[in-house]
Amino acid sequence: MQQSAEFHTRVEHALANGQIKASFRSAMDGLMAKRKAAFPDTEALEILRLHGAQIRANSLSKLPELLEQLEMNCHKNGIQVHWAESIEDANNIVLTIMQNHQADLLIKGKSMVSEEMELNQFLEQHGIECIESDLGEYILQLAGEPPSHIVAPAIHKSRQQIAHLFNEKFPDIPYSDDVDRLTRNAREILRKKFYAARVGLSGVNFAVAETGTLCLVENEGNGRMCTTVPPVHIAVTGIEKVVEKLEHIPPLLKLLCRSATGQTITTYFNMITSPRKLGEKDGPEEIHLVLLDNGRSRIYEDDELITTLRCIRCGACMNHCPVYARIGGHAYGSTIPGPIGSILEPQKAGLDKLGDLPTASTLCGACAEVCPVHIPIPKLLNRLRYERTRNDHAGATLGQSSGRTVMEAGTWKGWSWVHSQPRLYRLAMYIITRLRKLLPQRIGPWTQVRKAPHIAPKTLHELALKEGFNDK
Amino acid sequence: MTEEKRYPEKPEKVYYFGTCLMDLLYPEAGLAGMQLIQREGVEVVFPQDQTCCGQPAWNSGYRVEAIRVARRQLDCFNEDYPIVVPSGSCAGMMRHQYPEMFKGNTDELRANTLAGRIFELTEFLVHVLKITLEDLGSPVKVALHTSCAARREMGVATEHEALLKQLSNVEILEQSRKEECCGFGGTFAVKHPAISAEMVSEKANAITATGADTLISGDCGCLMNIAGHLEYQEKQIDSHHIASFIWERTHATER
């Protein structure tokens, strides 16, 4: 159970760091308030969420056909489509495109799939420099850290930490912890990179099958720069991001922006349908779309777990999660943290690697309550707990049964044995109540911060009989 | 919850599912719930063969073990009476999870029928019995913690509040982040004690900060967690299940 130890160590580390808790608590409070203000009418919100869920469920139900349609329409539009079964495949596709253009610099817009691919590390091994152009991602690249939130990646860093980081990395620029000044500095550094890069990379929020359109949601304009300034644009995305029709975009966009940051719409919304056409003055000469599977088609096979793939990456589940708010994103040790990460990532990487994540939830339901596409997250967490501990070989989830321990299985077997035999149960409870004063007052981790529960002198079964309540 | 709720007419008899935590830790609250229903002229049947709804194992991933225990409960409630459960969590398990548990199984129909007859205590008192309460107690300030299952799975947060608001000498003090989980989560508290500790201590602080004399909850899991922590911190706050709190304040012969 090495991974357990690692997860617990990261959690302990996060909880011991007051700044992590303070940063996440206040940031999440802000995001929750903004979302709430963006959806003043709860009935209208529910109608919209059901609509969003239906659109995503519909797209997933026809996933193979829609992907073929997407490929065909992208091809018609002049976008080159590449299929990647694994992250190795996807990385190699990007590398080949870079090499074909003798490009040694990649300018990147925000993309969680590229994080999943660990693309930067891969390309750097091949002598290619990658520059993150989303401000949060750029800060993290300077710090050498992964994102801790899917929408606000550097949310765990304070303004002062960022100021010191810039000062350390760019000693020639005068120190400032003024947000506008820091942003201007980053902008000046990045602007030169935009001009120099021959290839730009972006993610995709929605890929429209019927038109072959790639939609990109962003706030900084760096996404538009990455996809228009360099002569070559590579878009990387997971196969689940396809939607059937263009008319499906407005409701999903509305749900995404409002759920994520409370914005009515983001500052930039890009719809990319083709490379630069003859006579046009701007835009890339070549566009490549890399469609990554990496375990998604296995998730697709299961009627219940497929709902995981509905996600539109708004981050509302993490913003509302009481566990995430306390341990932050890095403690999860997965590309995507929080409730959605806890169901998605173990299915991709295997329950043997990330099986702790589904257990790190109280199943309070705050995530499912705000999910814009009605992903039943607690139900799926429960399902993965089962997959992790089940004792047969009938499941299809990677790393199935890897979390089953003799001790735990034995405990539940014993529990089940007692609780499925009423006479035995009543006898056991009778004995426990009578011996209550002899029972230990320290019970493992429970009593580290709590007094032991007070066992009653008589059970409810006994009181009900004594008070004359009928059994039938 | 988008599901529309339907409540039956006031019945002659109900079943009562006392829950395993009440059986061992809060039997007087379990009894109070039964007495509240009985006082309204409804006979309460307490099947002696009931044990636990199966949730602890179900939420830990041990489905075979959970189903074995849950199946035994199906045998206890054969007549067509409503089944009242003094816990949002156990009621949610039986109402919403049982149909999932027994899907495609020979007991599916029995499980679905039982699920449709499950009512959480406060919703039953408010909507079926349309109870009116006369407060005989002295003035008290309370903080109410509604469990996540009561709030989100069963949707009965307003029913908890409505009952307390009927008590004229009870002042409900609002705590910050009242909708946030207390950090119990069943085996979560044992598997992830450090996170659970952080959550319960913040919850307890929010409750203490209200200046309340008494903590009330409709779920024994939360009560055991929060009250256990308050006691550990030596805070002078009483804690009560909502059933015993209401019964003690409205019961005419003593107090």
Image (cartoon, coloured by chain):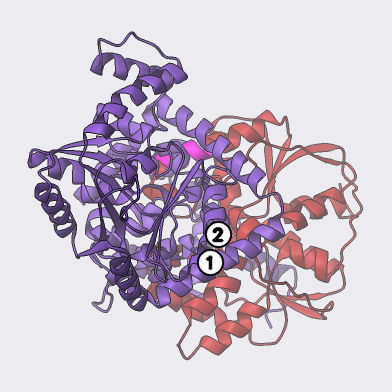
Chain colours: A purple, B red
Q: Is residue A94 left or right of residue B195?
A: left
Residue A181 picture quarter:
top left
Where is mark 2, residue-wise? A250
Kindly check if marks 1 and 2 are in contact, taking CB atoms under 8 A apart as contact.
yes
Q: How many marks?
A: 2
Chain identity of mark 2? A
Residue A418 picture quarter:
bottom left
Q: Amino acid at mark 1?
A: Glu
Q: Which mark is residue A247?
A: 1
Q: Amino acid at mark 2?
A: Pro
Q: Residue at x 57, y 87 (%)?
A: B110
Q: What residue span does the magenta drawing correspond to?
A: B194-200
Q: In the image shown, does A318 or A125 lie closer to the viewer?
A: A125
* Mark 2 secondary-structure assignment: helix
* Mark 1 secondary-structure assignment: helix
Q: Is residue B47 left or right of residue A96?
A: right
Camera sees residue B54: no
